[in-house]
Amino acid sequence: MIVTDLDMVDRQLIHALRLDGRVSFSAVAEVLGVSDQTVARRYKRMRGDGVLRVVGLPDPVRLGRGMWLLRLRATPDAAASVATALARRPDTTWVSLSSGGTEIVSAVQPSHTADRDDLLLQKLPRTPRIVSVGAYLLLRVFAGGSVGGAAPPDVLAPRQRAALAFAASGPVTPLEPADDGLLALLAKDGRTSLADLATGTGWSESTVRRRLTLLRSSGSIYFDVEVDPALLGYGVQVMLWLSVEPAHLDEVGHALAGHTEVVFAAATSGPTNLVATVVFQETAMVYDYLVRRIGPLPGVREIQTAPSIRTVKQVGTIER
């Protein structure tokens, strides 16, 4: 990846894409007060340099599927290879290394019960040099969609956000086997044109448009932006595993969702019942956040902090 200095227009474009991954460049240009060509050129440059990528994914929470967070511990010599193997799986949407490189955290959404059982009961326990396996079911997402973002989207004014935001509504549309080809294309590039989606699926362009509109409007699929948070000024990423008294779980979850540092927060099963991904500009901010923002929250009994060392896979599928 070519490291590129991102100016305000770049950052605003990234924020706009997080609000609506398939928003038209003309709509973004009008809101930002620049030309369509400027927006298209900025996107093409950042996309070509590997700075960002928009991906479309099924929303497992809205679809009633199980989204699992895996927390694996491995020997130092094996952690990186295990993380890479998980990242290659099409059903993983996020993989990171943390805690000195011996802990692997991954978000997995198996399509079928058999796939889940094969991974959790067979493959992972039998993988050499994996010390422990923890699997936690997501029960409620408070912030960050189904996977979480890369950095707080804070560069657009409220009126600009309102003009660009896309909101799903209505009953969820179940996915069908025929959607697999469409979903595979969107997982690689969520902004693939209708013409290319039609070519890749073998559908007509009008069929692609109707199906994509239906899946988006019902929230069956969502779009996220893959971007290195360090390029946005957030070089420190920490996962928090919290144990919260059940009576305060909803209150604490919503409180975390209101923190600008939090890019993902969800209630889970397991010995800890709330997990959050938090980003900072520098390490000193972590202590202040824990003491001043988490400490006063009611019902928080325990906090485990796991600084992330490297994100192996952020969203979508790995491009080859």
Image (cartoon, rainbow, N blue to C red):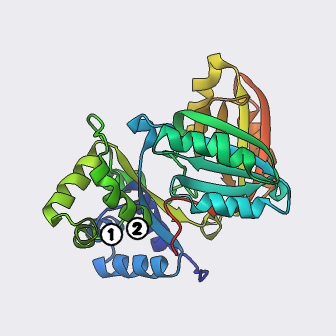
Mark 2, Cα crowd under 10 Å, few <14 / some 14-19 / many 20+, is some
Mark 1, Cα crowd under 10 Å, few <14 / some 14-19 / many 20+, is some
At a point 18% along the width and 54% down the height, the residue shown is 210
Question: Which quarter of the rendered picture does the N terminus lie within?
Answer: bottom right
What amino acid is found at the position of numbered circle 1 in the picture? Thr
Quadrant in the rendering for residue 183 = bottom left
- Does 224 appear above or below 304? below
In the picture, measured across the screen, residue 199 lies left or right of residue 8, that is left
In the picture, measured across the screen, residue 7 lies left or right of residue 76, that is left
At a point 72% along the width and 33% down the height, the residue shown is 242
What amino acid is found at the position of numbered circle 2 in the picture? Asp
Confirm whether residue 319 shows in the render: yes
Residue 216 vs residue 129, the one in the foreground:
129
Confirm whether residue 281 shows in the render: no
In the picture, measured across the screen, residue 76 lies left or right of residue 314, that is right
| Residue 267 drawn at (x, y percent) | 60, 32
| Residue 314 drawn at (x, y percent) | 57, 60
At a point 79% along the width and 39% down the height, the residue shown is 304
Q: CA separation, marks 1 and 2?
A: 6 Å
Residue 62 vs residue 249, the one in the foreground:
62
In the picture, measured across the screen, residue 106 lies left or right of residue 162, that is right
- Does 106 appear above or below 251? below
Residue 30 vs residue 255, the one in the foreground:
255
Quadrant in the rendering for residue 59 = top left
The residue wearing badge 2 is 189
Q: Residue furthest top?
A: 247
The residue wearing badge 1 is 192
